[in-house]
Image (cartoon, grey):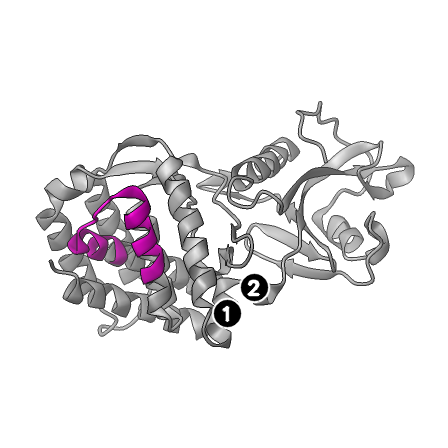
């Protein structure tokens, strides 16, 4: 798999549309391992093609306020960043970056000698049943495997250098901005957006000195149960790649969100195991009130991210229900999180 920076010659005079690439990558005979089947899954930023042994990720040529994948150079850089950033937490999963090239007359090929038309992240495919979210939905995860995964993540946090202190003013500004956007989604007067905003603003003000003493580190950035794979060895997938600043936070905030989401899925004890492992590994006795602030802040953010799906013309369910669930969890966090 390619790791060095290519000259990035771009194929001309061939059909390099996204639809053509998707059609090619949806065929089993396109892959070097010659799989029996290919499953194509679309996400907001990528297409993922699953063979029995591999997962191949193609970045979409999209552009938003916070990222721009419209050029082949930008997609190549993000593919390289994805492999580099994820190997510390999933060393045997991220295999490398491969070029999707165009042969004469526009025929596509993975890893060929022609000019690149795009790039793919190649990963070892993991059993979907091993995913923490799927384990929770299927029953209860194995406690020993959860504890081992929590220890690995805690050691990762302990080894990450600090990058500056938390800014309580920035937190308060983001809370106000997110709440104002959420209030425009017509969730209903009983959704609790205003109540969560007001109580969270009060909590941040009350914990201002403690928050300002907290140190940020470069963390996972998108630590959700669907990205956690307990087992041997435990691995954590899909670190946030396109903006480093979004990976810079207090590890306690990232763990607060994981705990929030495991509670939303019905297994609050899983998040508690991760928090306890972090405290033991780092000696960081995070006050309960600080965790409550972080949980409520992330609940508001993810209520907004869920609610935005309503603006994209998607189905009302499950996004309206999920938005309201996050708002309720945020309010509950502040009700029970006082020291």
Q: Is residue 219 visible?
A: no
Q: Position of residue 192 (x, y in %)?
A: 22, 68
The circle drawn on residue 130 is 2
Dot 1 or dot 2: first in sequence order is 2
In-image side of 335 versus 305 (left or right)? left
Image quadrant where residue 61 sits: top right
Q: Secondary structure at mark 2?
A: helix
- Magenta highlight: main SS: helix
Q: CA distance from mark 1 to mark 2?
A: 7 Å
In this rendering, would 91 be left or right of 110? left
Element carrying mark 1: helix
Q: Residue at x 71, y 32 (%)?
A: 2
Q: Which residue is mark 1?
A: 135
Which residue of the protein is positioned furthest toward the top in this rendering? Answer: 7
Where's residue 76, x and y in %? Answer: 63, 34
Residue lying farthest to the bottom in this orientation:
139
Residue displayed at 30% across by 55% down: 276
| Contact flag, marks 1 and 2 (Cβ < 8 Å) | yes
Quadrant in the rendering for residue 292 = bottom left
Q: Is residue 241 magenta?
A: no
The one nearer the camera, 142 or 98, is 142
Q: Is residue 147 above or below residue 103?
A: below
> Residue 8 appears at what percent x and percent y?
71, 27
Identify the residue at image location x=23%, y=40%: 170
- Residue 176 located left or right of residue 65: left
Residue 162 seen in this snapshot: yes
- State which quarter of the image contains the N terminus: top right
- What is the span of residues highlighted in magenta in the rendered image? 272-295
Which residue sits furthest right? 105
Horizontal placement of 159 versus 34: left or right?
left
**Residue at point 27% right, 67% down?**
329
């Amino acid at each position: 798999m390619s790791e060095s920076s290519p000259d990035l010659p771009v194929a001309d005079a061939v059909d390099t549309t996204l639809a053509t690439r998707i059609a090619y990558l949806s065929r089993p005979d396109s892959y070097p391992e010659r799989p029996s089947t290919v499953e194509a899954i679309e996400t907001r930023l990528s297409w993922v093609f699953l063979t029995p042994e591999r997962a191949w990720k193609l970045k979409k040529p999209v552009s938003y306020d916070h990222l721009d994948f419209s050029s082949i150079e930008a997609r190549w850089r993000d593919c390289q960043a994805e492999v580099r950033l994820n190997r510390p937490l999933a060393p045997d999963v991220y295999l490398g970056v491969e070029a999707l090239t165009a042969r004469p007359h526009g025929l596509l090929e993975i890893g060929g000698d022609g000019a690149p038309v795009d790039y793919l992240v190649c990963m070892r495919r993991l059993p979907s049943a091993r995913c923490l979210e799927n384990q929770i939905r299927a029953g209860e995860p194995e406690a020993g495997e959860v504890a081992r995964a929590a220890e690995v993540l805690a050691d990762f946090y302990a080894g990450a250098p600090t990058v500056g202190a938390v800014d309580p003013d920035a937190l308060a500004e983001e809370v106000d901005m997110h709440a104002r956007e959420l209030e425009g989604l017509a969730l209903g007067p009983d959704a609790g957006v205003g109540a969560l905003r007001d109580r969270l603003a009060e909590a941040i003000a009350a914990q201002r000195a403690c928050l300002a003493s907290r140190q940020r580190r470069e963390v996972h950035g998108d630590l959700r149960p669907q990205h956690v794979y307990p087992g041997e060895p435990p691995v954590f997938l899909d670190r946030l790649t396109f903006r480093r600043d979004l990976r810079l936070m207090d590890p306690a905030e990232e763990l607060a969100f994981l705990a929030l989401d495991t509670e939303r899925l019905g297994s609050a004890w899983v998040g508690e195991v991760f928090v306890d492992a972090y405290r033991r590994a780092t000696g960081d006795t995070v006050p309960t009130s600080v965790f409550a602030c972080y949980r409520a802040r992330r609940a508001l953010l993810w209520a907004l991210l869920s609610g935005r799906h309503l603006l994209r013309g998607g189905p009302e369910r499950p996004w309206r229900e999920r938005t309201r669930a996050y708002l309720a969890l945020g309010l509950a966090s502040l009700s029970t999180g006082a020291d």
